[in-house]
Structures are given as structure tokens and as C-alpha cells.
Image (cartoon, rainbow, N blue to C red):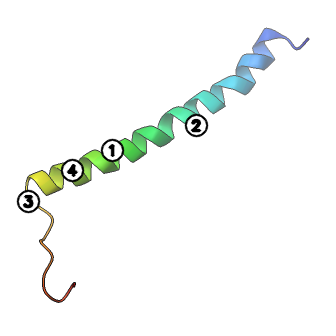
Amino acid sequence: MISEQIFYLFLFPWIIFIATIPGSVMTFLFAGLAAQLLNYLPDKTEADE
């Protein structure tokens, strides 16, 4: 059996890695939603279609 210190040393980088990715994704999603609600994003023009 491995020691407790080595186990946590292996585990903690994965916890941080798994925790940061949804955080950054949610930040971009909320930023886009806020921009849409506040009409910061330009509407589609006829050139886009």
C-alpha cells in the first residue's frame, strides 16, 4: 500500500485540473449570455446570412 502523502500528492493535481475546466467553460458561457442580454453582441446582418 502506498503512503498517504504520495496518494494525496497524486490526487490533488487531478482535483484542481477537473475543477478549473468547468469553471473556465462556465465563465465563457455566462460572459456570452450577459453580452447577449445586454445587447453587446451585434445582431446578424444580411451579409452574415
Between discs 4 and 3, the one toward the N terminus: 4
Residue at screen point 21% across, 84% down: 48
Q: Residues within 10 Å of mark 3 (few under 14, many from 20)?
A: few
- Residue on which the image places disc 3: 39
Q: Kindly identify which numbered label has been placed on residue 33.
A: 4
- Residue on which the image places disc 1: 27
Q: Position of residue 28 (x, y in %)?
A: 33, 50
Residue 18 vertical position relative to residue 36 in the rendered view, above or below:
above
Residue at screen point 88% across, 14% down: 2
Residue at screen point 49% across, 37% down: 20
Of the residues tagged 1 and 3, which is closer to the observer?
3
Secondary structure found at label 3? loop
Count up the numbered dots: 4
Q: Position of residue 33 (x, y in %)?
A: 21, 50
- Residue on which the image places disc 2: 17
Q: Residues within 10 Å of mark 1 (few under 14, many from 20)?
A: few
Q: Which three-letter amino acid code belongs to the residue tagged 4?
A: Leu
Between discs 2 and 4, the one toward the N terminus: 2
Between discs 2 and 3, the one toward the N terminus: 2
